[in-house]
Image (tube, rainbow, N blue to C red):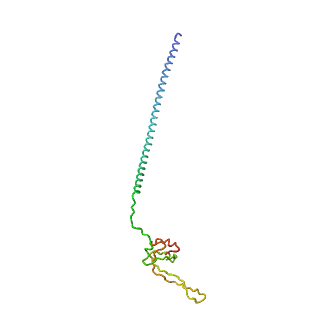
Amino acid sequence: MIPLNQENMRQVLILAAAIVVGIIAVGMVGQYVTSQVQNETQRLAVEYQQAQKAKEQEYEKQMAALHQEMKKIEASAKKAAEDAARTAAQQARPVVVENKGPVKKPSLALKTPKGKRAVTVLIDSLGAVGGLLNPGDAVDVIAHLDVPVPRKAKKDTGKETITAMLFQNLLILAVNTNVEDVGTLYDQQQADKALKV
C-alpha cells in the first residue's frame, strides 16, 4: 500500500471527481437518449396512427363508392327483370285479331256479267290507251283487217286493208292480274310493252 500524502490525495480526489462526473454524464446522456427515443417513438406512433386513419378513410370512401355502385347495379338488374317480365307478359297475352269476315280474293268469274264470257286479248301498251286501262273501264274494239277483193290487174295483191268497229262499250274485267285495284299498277303497266286485257 502506498501512503497517502497530499499529492496523492489530490490525484485520488480528481480521479474520484472525474468518475463521479463521468457517471453523471453517462446518466444524463442515457436520460437524453431515452427521452429522444421516447419522443421519436411518440412521433412515429402519431404518424403511424395518422397514416392508418388516412388508409381507413380511403378504404371507407372506396367501400362507400362500391356500395353505391352495387345499388346502381341492383336497381338496373331489378329494372331489367321488370322489363323482361313485362315483355314476357305481353308476349304471353293472347293476340286478339279482329275478324273482318272472309278475305275477298279477286275473282274474274265474279266480275263477269251473267250470260257473258271473258276473253283475253294481248295488245301493245300504246293500243291500250297508253297503258292507262283499268278494270271497270268501257272500251270500243277497232281492228285493221285485210279483206280479199277481186283482182282487176296483175299487179293487184287482191287484198284491201280496212278499219272496222268490231265491238262497242265492252267492259274491261282485268288488266294482267289486276282485277280490282284501279290505278295501283300504273307504273308497271307503263313499263310493260304488251298488256293482257
Q: Position of residue 125 (x, y in %)?
A: 51, 75
Q: Nearer the viewer, residue 54 or 70?
A: 70
List the single residue furthest toward the right: 154
Q: Position of residue 70 (x, y in %)?
A: 43, 46
**In which image quadrant can residue 112 be found?**
bottom left
Instruction: Count the labels in the image.
Output: 0
Q: Position of residue 16 (x, y in %)?
A: 50, 16
Q: Is residue 165 above or below residue 91?
A: below
Q: Is residue 107 above or below residue 76?
A: below
Q: Nearer the viewer, residue 120 or 31?
A: 120
Q: Nearer the viewer, residue 157 or 8?
A: 157
Q: Is residue 19 above or below residue 160?
A: above
List the single residue furthest toward the front: 115
Q: Is residue 116 above or below residue 102?
A: below
Q: Position of residue 54 (x, y in %)?
A: 45, 38
List the single residue furthest toward the bottom: 152
